[in-house]
Structure formats: C-alpha cells, structure tokens
Image (spheres, rainbow, N blue to C red):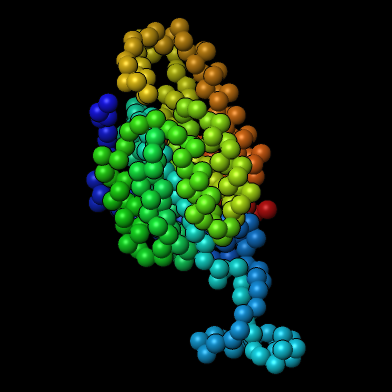
C-alpha cells in the first residue's frame, strides 16, 4: 500500500532542532546534570587508570601511587562515553494526524534535537528506524555527521510505512550494544504492545536507562463533543470508514485513556522514564526537561 507521507524539509528540521538544542544545552550546561539525567548518578568516581603524559597531574591518585609505585589518575563518570540509541517508529500510524506537525515530523525534530544534545555533550549517537523491518541502522559515533545523517534520513518520505513489529528491534539492540548505553524510544505506541513491553524490561535491565516518549495526535487520545461524522482510516489496511464520532466517542476516549495509562505503567514498572507529548505542544524543550526532572532533582 502506498502511504501518503508528510515530512519536513531538511533545512526546516535542522533549524528547529538547533533552536531547541541551545535552549536545552543552556539548561543542562553543567555536564554533571546531563550525566545525572542519563545515569541517575551524576559526577562520581568510576575507576583508576594508568597515568599518561596527556593527563592533568592534579588527578593523580597518590594513595594508589604509594601502593603500586605507578601513577594512576581518577576517572569520573563524565569521562565515560555512552552510546545514546534513538529508536524511531517509522510505521504508518506515525504518518497520520490532524495538526500542523504530523507525528513523524514531530518525532524527527525531537530525535534530531536529542541527538544534537548528546553529541554536544560528548556521547556517541546512533539511530534505529523501524516498522515491519529495520529500515535504518546508523552506527554510534561522536561525529556531527552522524546527527546530520539522522536528520536527513528522517526527512526521506520513502522510509515510512508498514506495521510495527517491536520484536525485530530486540535482538538488534540487545545483542549490539553494551551496558554503557541509554535508549530513547519515540513512537505513538499504537498497535500490539506485548513485544514492546518485553523489550523495555530487557533493555532496562541491561542498559544505563530507557526513556519512552509517546508522541500522539490529539485525536489519538480524545474525540471532543460535536465532531459529527468523521472518516477513520485503518492504519494497517488503509481501509477508510465513515463513522458517527458522537456514537463512539465515550467508548473510544475511555479505551484510549486506559491504553495510555497501561503503557506508562509498563515503562515505569520496568524502571524506565516515560513522557507523553501531543503534536500541538510547541515547547519541546519543556517536555524534555519534565521527562528528566525526577532524575535531575532526586
């Protein structure tokens, strides 16, 4: 089935992301806050390693030197590079919407913004884009070219479409990346979710952390009164039906509320972070800070 996809132009996506990044970097400009966000520990001692001429002598651990006869320096958590993995849902449901920015467009800005922040603060950045197969796998790197590649890929209309198959990302992520990784999942989370919950639990147990960001069109969650008859398209089959919104509104809204609450509970029970954002939310930076607020201040 041919999917009619809307994407941002590359220059527009890059401009929007740059604006968000510098707002975020200003808020997270002290690197210890960033690492407290990602590792929930902040700056702290990690290990000792042998001193080299490039090291600052102020960090020599003299107690270790006295014991071993060799100079060693202290390594702190902020010196440890992490793999920041952005898993982006490219399925058909992400291309549907009623607002200025469709879900996939909103996700592209959010993923590029977060990738730029990770790059700016020194971590390796990578991206996996999927629907019924893994369509994009960008290897981890500290190069700005990787962030540019993420932005360019997400503006390509041809990568979107297909049903979600969460099971295909489980081996791709768990078998490829080590414990020094943090996973962001950007999706509307519409469709079957058992494999998603399994992945979140396993990833939370293996990696430094997992954060789920639910991106939804307002009509994904709530049909207001007085809408009348509307066309609803089945995202899997493409079939379009005319329905009376007033007749299905109460049942639809309650089912959507329960679904969203279940998803949030599954993430939090696994020890993962979770946030929901609508495509009408203009202050993306505020949403990101709120997502991490508990880790920053606890």
Give x and y (percent) for residue 146: 35, 59
Q: Is residue 197 left or right of residue 249?
A: right
Give x and y (percent) for residue 39: 60, 58
Tell me the quarter of the picture where residue 157 sits.
top left
Q: Is residue 77 left or right of residue 141?
A: right
Q: Which residue is at 31% across, 37% downward?
A: 160
Q: Which residue is at 58% across, 23% downward?
A: 258
| Relative to 181, residue 165 above or below | above
Tell me the quarter of the picture where residue 147 sits.
bottom left
Q: Which residue is at 46% across, 56% downward?
A: 24
| Relative to 160, residue 171 above or below | below
Looking at this view, is 238 or 147 the one in front? 238
Could you tell me if residue 193 is visible in this image? yes
| Relative to 174, residue 277 above or below | above
Give x and y (percent) for residue 205: 64, 49
- Quarter holding the N terminus is top left
Q: Is residue 199 left or right of residue 116?
A: right
Q: Which residue is at 45% across, 34% downward?
A: 165
């Amino acid at each position: 089935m041919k999917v009619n996809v809307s994407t941002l132009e590359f220059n527009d996506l890059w401009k929007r992301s740059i604006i968000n990044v510098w707002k975020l970097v200003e808020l997270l400009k002290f690197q210890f806050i960033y690492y407290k966000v990602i590792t929930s520990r902040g700056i702290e001692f990690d290990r000792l390693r042998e001193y080299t001429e490039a090291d600052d002598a102020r960090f020599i651990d003299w107690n270790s030197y006295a014991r071993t006869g060799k100079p060693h320096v202290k390594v702190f958590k902020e010196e440890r590079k992490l793999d920041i993995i952005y898993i982006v849902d490219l399925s058909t449901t992400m291309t549907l919407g009623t607002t200025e920015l469709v879900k996939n467009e909103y996700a592209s800005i959010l993923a590029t913004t977060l990738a730029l922040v990770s790059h700016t603060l020194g971590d390796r950045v990578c991206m996996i884009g999927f629907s019924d197969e893994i369509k994009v796998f960008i290897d981890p790197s500290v190069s700005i070219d990787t962030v540019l590649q993420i932005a360019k890929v997400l503006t390509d209309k041809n990568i979107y479409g297909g049903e979600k198959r969460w099971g295909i990302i489980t081996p791709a992520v768990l078998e490829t990346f080590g414990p020094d990784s943090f996973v962001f999942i950007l999706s509307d989370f519409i469709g079957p979710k058992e494999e998603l919950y399994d992945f979140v639990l396993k990833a939370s147990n293996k990696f430094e952390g997992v954060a789920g960001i639910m991106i939804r069109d307002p009509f994904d969650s709530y049909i207001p009164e007085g809408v009348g008859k509307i066309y609803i398209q089945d995202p899997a089959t493409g079939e379009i039906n005319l329905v009376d919104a007033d007749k299905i509104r109460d049942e639809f809204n309650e089912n959507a509320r329960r679904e969203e609450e279940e998803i949030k509970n599954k993430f939090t029970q696994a020890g993962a972070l979770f946030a929901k954002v609508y495509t009408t939310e203009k202050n993306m930076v505020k949403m990101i800070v709120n997502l991490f607020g508990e880790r920053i201040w606890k």
